[in-house]
Image (cartoon, helix red, strand yellow):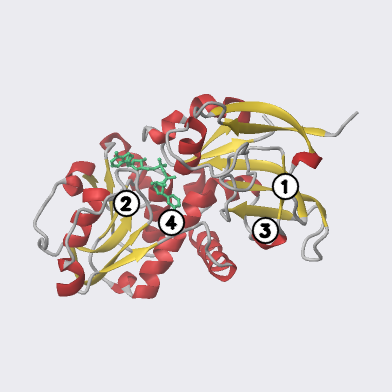
Amino acid sequence: MADTFTALVAEQPDGRTVVKSTSLEETALPPGEVIIDVAYSSLNYKDGLALTGRGKVIRKWPMIPGIDLAGRVRSSSSPRFRPGDAVLVTGYGLGVSWWGGFSQRARVKESMVLAIPEGLDARSAMAIGTAGFTAALCVLALQDHGTLRTDRELVVTGAAGGVGSIAVALLAALGKKVVASTGRTSEAAYLKTLGAADIIGRDVLSQKGPPLASERWGGGVDTVGGQTLVTLCSQTAYRGAVAACGLAGSSDFPGTVFPFILRNVALLGCDSDMTPMEERTRAWKLLVQHLGKLHLDAVTEEVPMSRLVEFAPRIVDGQVRGRVVVNVNA
Ligand SMILES: NC(=O)c1ccc[n+]([C@@H]2O[C@H](COP(=O)([O-])OP(=O)(O)OC[C@H]3O[C@@H](n4cnc5c(N)ncnc54)[C@H](OP(=O)(O)O)[C@@H]3O)[C@@H](O)[C@H]2O)c1
């Protein structure tokens, strides 16, 4: 009998995205040096857009979505990896232009593969996933800029989401006073468990204000974009910085240059997809050092791949708290 595995395959027959659980043979996978038995993937905002077809995320059809995966090497023609090695892949077009993680098996280029850092397993690595990795990149950007030396409060927007939850936990673990901005004040207790010192409503920052408002924050991590990012920059203190990674609210930037040219505020862009390996290793190290198991357990829920398509709209509608790991064998 042929050796088959199950994957979610997205197609666009008539402009509509259709995702179906499909049985595939290994020969169908793209060429690459490393074949991985996937154990877990995760659901990120971008995966939600891909699975629901609500955003133009997928660049090649048919596609196996899933921008993250973790598991064990099944076979490898690369001397860097041996069968049984615990590995993860995030980004590099995974689930967008390269068949991704919502699959029991994947074949990737060796340059895409990272050993799962010591202290994590496939499930906890995916509880972090692209969202947590991006949060770490934002924190590193603030650290490199010198912003973490501030005594002022730092704000995290979209705080109850995946990137937001892990950014709150990381900044708090680094000893910073973190204010969590959320549209779900019902999640205040959860955000305080992660280390938030205070909670503010989403509407506080989504209001249009003066181009330069009173200095309120040392800086922050923004996952929302639009007016929220503009207001955050306008309220950031002299020489502070905002690390921007998301567009959960809007991809617009309806602001002025005043915070940048009069207050020396820095807007630090963060992309997780094409991050060089050296920076990836640095981000995962920060995550392993500062995210406790308790925090990871608090932010994570598990969904079987067999239920993922029906679950996916929830992340685009802002209804997911923290992170969702996807068990691809259930
Ligand atoms: N640059 C990169 O490489 C990169 C990597 C990963 C993620 N991202 C982006 O970062 C963002 C967050 O990703 P994620 O995986 O953390 O998603 P997520 O879990 O869905 O979190 C997004 C959060 O944003 C808030 N939100 C949702 N809709 C909103 C709206 N209309 N206005 C204001 N706030 C809203 C919600 O938080 P509250 O309920 O707490 O308000 C929601 O939980 C997404 O835009 C994603 O595309 C970028």
Residue pointed to by mark 3 = 113
- Report the front residue among 198 and 262: 262
Name the image quarter holding the N terminus. Answer: top right
Q: Is mark 2 on a helix, strand or loop?
A: loop
Q: Do the residues labelled 4 and 3 touch (CB within 8 Å)?
A: no
Alpha carbon separation for disc pair 2 and 4:
15 Å
> Closer to the observer: label 4 or label 3?
3
> How far apart in space, not on screen, are marks 1 and 2 (Cα)?
43 Å
**Marks 3 and 2, how far apart at CA:** 33 Å
| Measured Cα–Cα span from mark 4 to mark 3 | 20 Å
Label 3 packing within 10 angstroms: few (<14), some (14-19), many (20+)? many
Three-letter amino acid code at the position of disc 4: Ala
Front position among marks 1 and 3: 1
Question: Residue placed at 59% from the left, 31% from the top?
Answer: 11
Task: State the residue position of label 2.
Answer: 196
Give the residue pinned by disc 1.
30
Q: Which residue lies furthest to the right in this view?
A: 1
Q: In this view, does 311 lie above or below 105?
A: above
Residue most extreme to the front: 14
Labels 1 and 3: the sequence-earlier one: 1
Mark 3: secondary structure: loop
Which residue occupies the foreground of this view, 146 or 6? 6
Residue 282: x %, y % from top left = 54, 68
Which corner quadrant holds the C terminus? top right
Q: Which of marks 2 and 4 is nearer the N terminus?
A: 4
Residue that mark 4 sits on: 135
Kind of residue at badge 1: Pro
